[in-house]
Image: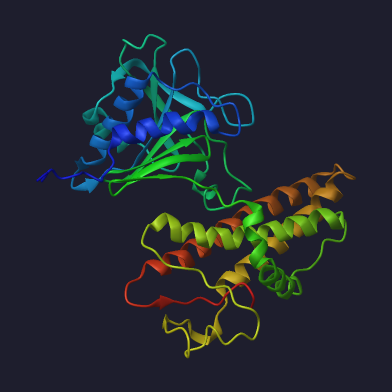
Amino acid sequence: MDKRIRLTHSFPADLARQVRIQWPTLPKSPPPLPDESLLQTLIETAYLASMETEEARSLRFTLCCTASSMDAPAQGQGGAVEAWPFAKDRTFSAQEIRRLSVATNVDTSALWVQFSDNAQEPLTIHGLLNLGMPWTSAPNAFAYYYDSLPEALLLRVEAPGQIAVYCGESLVASLKSGRIQVENQLATHDLVAIDPILREGHSVLREQIPAPSRAVERNWEQYEWLSYVNTVLAVVSAIQRSGHGGALILARMGSRFTSDDYVRIKYRLAGGAAHLSSRFVQFVSQHHRYMDVVSLAKRASDSPVVQRQLLTDYLIRDALHRLAEACAFVGNLASTDGGAGHARGLHR
């Protein structure tokens, strides 16, 4: 009788193989990957480093891996990401990652790892990269304002044993809790089934948003609609990224589905507050004002108009930041144990 135990878990080597399988299927021509053995070393070392601690704190870091013959090119913009190369390359090891990771932020900077065309030469830490404005806005569906990521292989480590592999902004595959997940992006046609509900919610909020007086109607209407859909997707993304489970309920106006007869609300907001809706309205309204100012600036070059444009641009970025925070908070409520969280939806 065969009593051998079959292991069902995946390991860093399995993630490396999956990345090599997925890499050629990416929509754009992907940048070069390290040799097969070096790619496995890269992921395994990052995995081991994720188990380390620095003064009792778990490490969170991003690695950007490029060929030694190239810079870290900025995705879609040309040029290169701001780099701080070391005078002498450092050894690529879990201990060196542990020491350097405390000088970086998982969202805004990265350790720059390089590989040689000669597969016999080891990986090295070439320096640090400044990724700029937090790029986590991109996977949260808010891709309006953020600095471009390097068009390169990226490894993001947020917790012990948890690695996500990106090509620029595109999530390729991840390893979490011993399981590999290949990212399946939500396509536009997947939203067809809920389109009537989304349209109804958008039409209700549309009444609270002043329309631009100078911008082309087709342009601002399309932007407004995409912003609404992106807000819904941002909440879903926050739920998925937590890995804790949960669901987002979208209901028609007047539906009794979210009443106490069907859903037990554990954290009900006082006074019928609609924080998410109000922040969406503030963001889109500010964007529409910005479009008007831009249109005016094209016709006038005097200093007050230019200053007004800069101020409006700042205000729209601030409104976007607040909306993104609200989406993350609502999505994270799904991670609370023992019951459903509730926040007044985008319909009201």
In the depicted view, which residue is nearer to us: 212 or 153? 153
Tell me residue 311's x, y (percent): 69, 52
Viewport quadrant of the C terminus: bottom right
> Eyeballing the image, is 340 above or below 330?
below
Q: Quadrant of residue 36?
A: top left
Residue 35 in sight here: yes
Residue 151 in sight here: no
In the depicted view, which residue is nearer to us: 190 or 58? 190
Q: Residue at x 45, y 61 (%)?
A: 239
Q: Residue at x 57, y 52 (%)?
A: 186
Q: Residue at x 30, y 32 (%)?
A: 13
Q: Residue at x 26, y 40 (%)?
A: 50
Tell me residue 200's x, y (percent): 71, 73
For the view shown, which residue lies furthest in the right direction? 299
Tell me residue 316's x, y (percent): 66, 55
136 to the left or right of 313: left
> Eyeballing the image, is 165 above or below 255?
above
